[in-house]
């Protein structure tokens, strides 16, 4: 209130209230005639802050404790002959104040609404972001093909544990105490004396304990050996075990089954050859080779000039193995085999280093569909 104003003049008081408002309202004057929508420089946050300021200003100048409220109370107290004209003046001032506030509030509100809409706008016609598609690992691709072939021959697919006791990894498989495979140099042991299985042959034992005989099963899975990784070795790799036990099973069934498998896997011209070998869990035992899928047996880079590729080990299940799981070897006989998936995979995709299969470099893995 200006110094020296006549405080007890009611009209002066009313004018002072108007002036005080107008001074403060200066700040909002640009919003008076819907000006805000054109104000590109105004950010949404600023507008929201201004809206709050404006609400405070309205309370200060039109609320119960405002100067205007005090002036309105004077209406009943002025001399009767001045009351009408004073009343009119106050009304006019109030209407002016409320009108200015409403106008500014209105244009601020519409500015804020537009700005929020703009911020939330999405273009539904834009193409979406495509999720990057994964790929099946080459080992899995080969494993699935092997599974499909054996399932169609009436085999079940078994899965079992990767950490084993001595009994399953060695004893039940007729592997004697002195056998080098038991050496910690070759097999990983846990501190509690469990072994990371060094072959999937362990699943023969679990499967026969569960199912008894007859049984036809394959068991693909991880195995572990203490090898130093190089282009052809890895301490973890994949095998597929096969087992067929029934009455009257002979080596002829083994040969017929393996022949059928390689023909479906590598083409109808593929041949096999069996070489005598030794495994504790089979008698007799044989190594199986198949004619090279690349050159058909002529000799090439893939088969290292021999025309043959090693498939794996096989043989007639040793009677001691059947006995270990309570199957009578007088009634039942069977054959078994074990193949390396990684080697097969490496040859089929012409990889010059099998470590590529476990490095999980997407640039490598993306090439297999
Ligand atoms: N378990 C053998 C290995 O890891 C492979 C093998 C050979 C499995 C002969 C068999 C078999 O079932 O009969 O080298």
Image: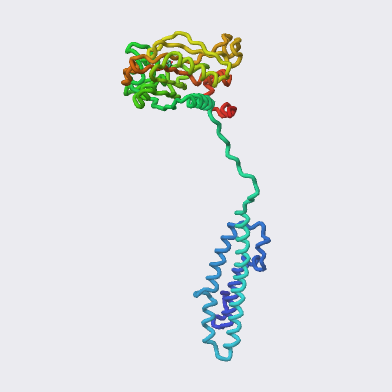
Asked if residue 171 can be seen in this view, the reply is no
Horizontal side of residue 236 vs 128, given as left or right: left
Horizontal side of residue 332 vs 264, given as left or right: left
Look at 49% across and 13% down and name the residue there.
288
Q: Image quadrant for the N terminus?
A: bottom right
Camera-nearest residue between 368 and 120: 368
Asked if residue 83 is positioned above or below residue 306 in the image, the reply reads below
Asked if residue 318 can be seen in this view, the reply is yes
Where is residue 55? Give x, y as percent. Answer: 55, 67
Where is residue 203? Give x, y as percent. Answer: 39, 23
Q: Image quadrant for the C terminus?
A: top right
Camera-nearest residue between 172 and 63: 172
Displayed quadrant of residue 30? bottom right
The furthest residue to the front: 248
Displayed quadrant of residue 36? bottom right
Where is residue 15? Give x, y as percent. Answer: 60, 78
């Amino acid at each position: 209130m200006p110094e020296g104003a006549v405080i007890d003049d009611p009209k002066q008081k009313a004018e002072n209230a108007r002036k005080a408002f107008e001074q403060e309202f200066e700040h909002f004057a640009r919003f008076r005639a819907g000006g805000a929508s054109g104000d590109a420089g105004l950010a949404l946050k600023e507008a929201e802050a201004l809206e709050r300021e404006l609400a405070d200003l309205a309370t200060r100048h039109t609320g119960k404790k405002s100067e205007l409220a005090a002036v309105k109370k004077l209406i009943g107290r002025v001399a009767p002959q001045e009351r009408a004209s004073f009343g009119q003046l106050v009304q006019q001032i109030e209407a002016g104040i409320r009108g200015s506030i409403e106008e500014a509030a209105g244009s601020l509100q519409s500015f804020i609404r537009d700005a929020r809409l703009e911020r939330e706008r999405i273009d539904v016609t834009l193409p979406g972001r495509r999720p990057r598609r994964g790929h099946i690992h080459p080992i899995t691709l080969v494993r699935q093909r092997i599974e499909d072939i054996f399932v169609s021959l009436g085999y079940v697919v078994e899965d079992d544990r990767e950490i084993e006791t001595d009994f399953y990894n060695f004893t039940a498989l007729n592997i004697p105490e002195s056998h080098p495979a038991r050496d910690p140099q070759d097999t990983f042991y846990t501190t509690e004396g469990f072994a990371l299985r060094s072959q999937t042959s362990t699943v023969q034992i679990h499967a026969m304990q569960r199912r008894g005989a007859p049984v036809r099963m394959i068991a693909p899975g991880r195995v572990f050996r203490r090898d130093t990784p190089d282009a052809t070795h890895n301490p973890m790799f994949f095998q597929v075990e096969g087992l067929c036990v029934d009455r009257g099973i002979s080596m002829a069934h083994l040969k017929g089954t393996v022949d059928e498998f390689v023909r479906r896997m590598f083409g109808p011209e593929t041949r096999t050859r069996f070489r005598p070998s030794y495994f504790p869990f089979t008698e007799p035992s044989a190594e199986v080779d198949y004619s090279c899928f690349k050159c058909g047996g002529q000799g090439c880079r893939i088969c290292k000039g021999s025309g043959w590729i090693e498939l794996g080990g096989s043989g007639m299940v040793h009677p001691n193995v059947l006995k270990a799981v309570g199957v009578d070897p007088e009634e039942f006989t069977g054959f078994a085999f074990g193949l390396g998936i990684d080697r097969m995979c490496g040859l089929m995709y012409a990889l010059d280093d099998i470590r590529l299969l476990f490095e999980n470099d997407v640039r490598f893995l993306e090439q297999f569909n």
